[in-house]
Image (cartoon, rainbow, N blue to C red):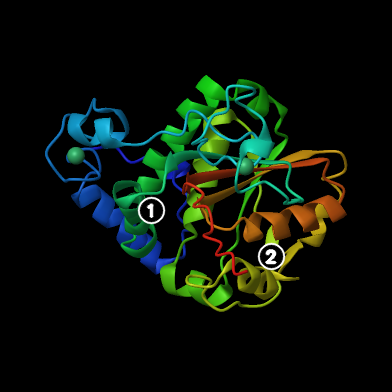
Amino acid sequence: MKKIDLENTAYKKDDKKNFIRLILDIIYPQNLSCVFCKMPISRSNKYSVCKSCYDQMVFIINACPKCGKPIINTSLKNDNDILDCDYCRNKSTIYDRNISFLEYEDKSKHLVFDLKYNSKTFLANNISDIMTDMLKEIYPDVIASIDYITYVPMSKKRSKDRGFNQAGEIAKRLGKNFDIECLDMIDRTRDTRKLHGLNADDRKRELRGVFKVQDDYTKYLEDRVVAVVDDIFTTGSTLNEIAKVLKLSGAKEVIGLTFLTGKYEKPIIEYIE
Ligand SMILES: [Zn+2]
Ligand SMILES: [Zn+2]
């Protein structure tokens, strides 16, 4: 039977929901079937993904150095020019950069949804292991510069319903993998509406003033580089709002580590003359 390392799980002792999940993890060990298609696989399969699903995963290798979105139209002049990124053009952000790992598509999105809505907390390990390997391979200098890891907090109500914060679970494992301290330092000052379905402007409005750095942590942030972990980069408003409060508390640099991001679809503009 799979040995569960109690000390290394993020479960709170007194949380009944988490305890039930821990038992479920023992009854249904995580490594026996592909996390995507549920086909049986051997324990040695990387990230618990079968060969066929692995081949279909879209890793973001060529990314915009600012927002982390995949670069689609690489110019011959300069591949890494953020002016070539449709998302970043004419946009100023408070965060310094975001790094994403897989493209948001049917397969990858189900991995996050399974973690989030089906309480498959073990998936946080698969996700952070993918992130870890790519950070080591592509961004060793970025990871070496990070002083603290933190994550996007959930609203009190949602965290009570769900019993865990998926971004927190991913962040804790990342912290362990890189031996960087992972701190739960951001609070929400109020609950927000569900952001799903809101456009960029409405999200921005809804998130204004929602986050704050817990008082205990402000003294640690002076001149520090902080990574903020989240599961999906949508409009970037969440990362931007958190970067704002971290920088107001003295942080020198804020880097988003967001598992999924989508290609930037160019808005269609109709010219009426
Ligand atoms: Zn599969
Ligand atoms: Zn960009």
What crowding class fits label 2: few (fewer than 14 Cα within 10 Å), some (14-19), or many (20 or more)? some
Q: Secondary structure at mark 1?
A: helix
- In this rendered view, identify the residue nearer to me: 92 or 33: 92
Of the numbered discs 1 and 2, the one sitting upstream in the chain is 1
Q: Position of residue 41 (x, y in %)?
A: 15, 33
Q: Amino acid at mark 1?
A: Val
Residue drawn where x is 32% and y is 57% of the image:
114
Closest to the observer: 214 or 39?
39
In 3D space, how far apart are the residues under numbered discs 1 and 2 (Cα atoms)?
Answer: 22 Å
Asked if residue 11 shows in the view, the reply is: yes
Q: Give how far across and how far down residue 151 sits, in percent.
A: 61, 52
- For mark 1, does the 10 Å Cα neighbourhood hold few (<14), some (14 to 19), or many (20 or more) residues? many
Q: Is mark 1 within 8 Å of ligand 1?
A: no
Position of 51 compared to 143: left or right? left
Is label 2 within 8 A of ligand 2 (CB to nearest ligand atom)?
no
Identify the residue at horizontal 51%, vertical 75% (top origin).
194
- The residue mark sitting in front, 1 or 2, is 1
Quarter of image, ligand 2? top right
Residue at label 2? 187
* 273 sits left or right of 230 in the view: right
In the structure shown, which secondary structural element does the residue marked by tag 2 occupy?
strand
Foreground residue among 140 and 182: 140
Residue 120 can be seen, yes or no = no
The amino acid marked with disc number 2 is: Asp
Q: Residue at image x 27%, y 55%? A: 23
Give the residue at mark 1: 112
> Could you say which quadrant of the image residue 162 lies in?
bottom left
> In the rendering, at what x and y percent does residue 205 appear?
69, 74
Q: In the shown orientation, is residue 243 left or right of residue 154?
A: right
